[in-house]
Image: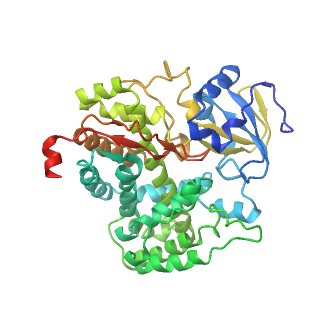
Amino acid sequence: MPGSGTEFRSDLDPTPLFDPRTYLDGVPHDLIAELRARAPVHWVPEPELMGWEAGPGFWAVLTHELMNRVLRDPGTFSSHLGATQIRDPQTAEMLEFVQRMMLNQDPPQHTRLRRLLMRSFTPSAVLELEATISARAERLVSAVEDRGRADFAKDVSAELPLLTLADIMGVPTQDRMLLFDWSNRVIGYQDAEYAASDVFDPATGTEMARRSREVRADIRPGPDGRMPDPRSREGLADMYAYAQDLATYKRANPGSDVVSILLAAPDDEGGITNEEFETMFFLFAVAGNETLRNGMPGGMWALLRHPDQLGKLLADPALLPGAIEEMLRFIPPVVHFRRTATRDVELGGCRVGAGDKVVVFHVAANRDPAVFAEPDRFDIERSPNDHLTFGAGPHFCLGAHLARRQMTAMFTESLSRLPNLRLDPARPPQRLLSNFQHGFKHLPVIWDVTRAERVAA
């Protein structure tokens, strides 16, 4: 226990909340519910596991009210002091590096970068993005509709956020699979399938991509035989090299994409530096891709697991906006985010000490019975639905609108083009090995193909 102590002790072991292997079977909602019923905040140890060294432990925040309080008070609960992942960076240099990212900053530094970014999402830029999302969703679903089966996570939904991000960032379409590779390496580095991901063909990419691949070839194991941590600059040196090249190109050849607008911000407004752009590129390439890439298969899984709700939606497509909000509540793609206490503070009956880790669990707040009636029930007509999937406070997700727009397009096309859509009983879903992102690597689905379509195929 931390030196600050606690007024509550539990004989119920909360350690599975920290262990990535727990989430291979899904979020431990029964454990969370029992813990929350005993107290809103619990001390969780960080034992040595899966090659991780033991850590000092953290406070797990399990209620909607306290998660809101923590996220809306950066003065007390800092994103900057220890960054926003449970595990501490391995070295002081690594901490200093990740602290430059907007995700790991507090006001006023965070406010300046967020303002610049928000201004870059001009109405015309957003309209241009939205105009292509529906067409792309239609193309992706059309490409599989005559098969009768597909991996929804890999074959259908994965490419939509990649293409949208490529548009936002001005990344050439032929380089988009680099984004896929980078996000896999960061989010899934504990998962053997994701950690070894390399689907990009350098022969099809730009010169920037080829230079990036040359840098990647120089990323080698250290004296201990391990590859550099992918959350460090060394571990993603190829991505940062690409970001530098892209920034140089966009400053000389600006377009209508969000990144060109961002890089062109005048200096009297605190124009963004190339170093700041590198870290913002990381935020786009990883957070902007992975959350939605997990959110769409998760939402589909929830819908197909509840055929009564699917039937309602098929009978009345106007229920789709509410259905998407319920998908986001029921199976949020982000499990948790960390803050660090800047001072001694009372939280949920616990005495949290300055420097203690405070970790808010989205998966717990979204099923808090104090806010959601029958929280374990999937109800596409739930109203109100005050979920915290996109966070709260100064770090509320900037991409929330575009995420909803992409989910709307993908579910509209999937449910209208794939009749009698259902989970494939012969091929079970496979979840990602991660305690941060809750997602499906594979979500096999099947549907009916009409006789006419079979003949045409």
Indicate the position of residue 178 as horizontal and vertical percent values: 46, 67
Q: Residue at x 58, y 41 (%)?
A: 24
Question: Furthest-right residue in view?
Answer: 3
Report whether residue 72 is seen: no
* Residue 254 at least partly seen: yes
Left or right placement of residue 154 versus residue 449 in this view = right
How far across and down, in percent of the image, does residue 44 sit? 74, 36
Q: Please give the name of the residue rendered at 74% of the width and 59% of the height, measured from the top-left corner.
A: 90
User: Which is nearer the eye, 318 or 145?
Assistant: 145
Instruction: Indicate whether 322 appears above or below 449.
Output: above
* Near-viewer residue (304 or 113): 304
Q: Which residue is found at the position 60% from the left and 34% from the top?
A: 67
Q: Is residue 353 above or below residue 201?
A: above
The image quadrant that residue 23 belongs to is: top right
Where residue 219 appears, as percent x and y from the top left, is 63, 74
For this view, does 433 lie left or right of residue 117? right
Say whether residue 391 is left or right of residue 11. Answer: left
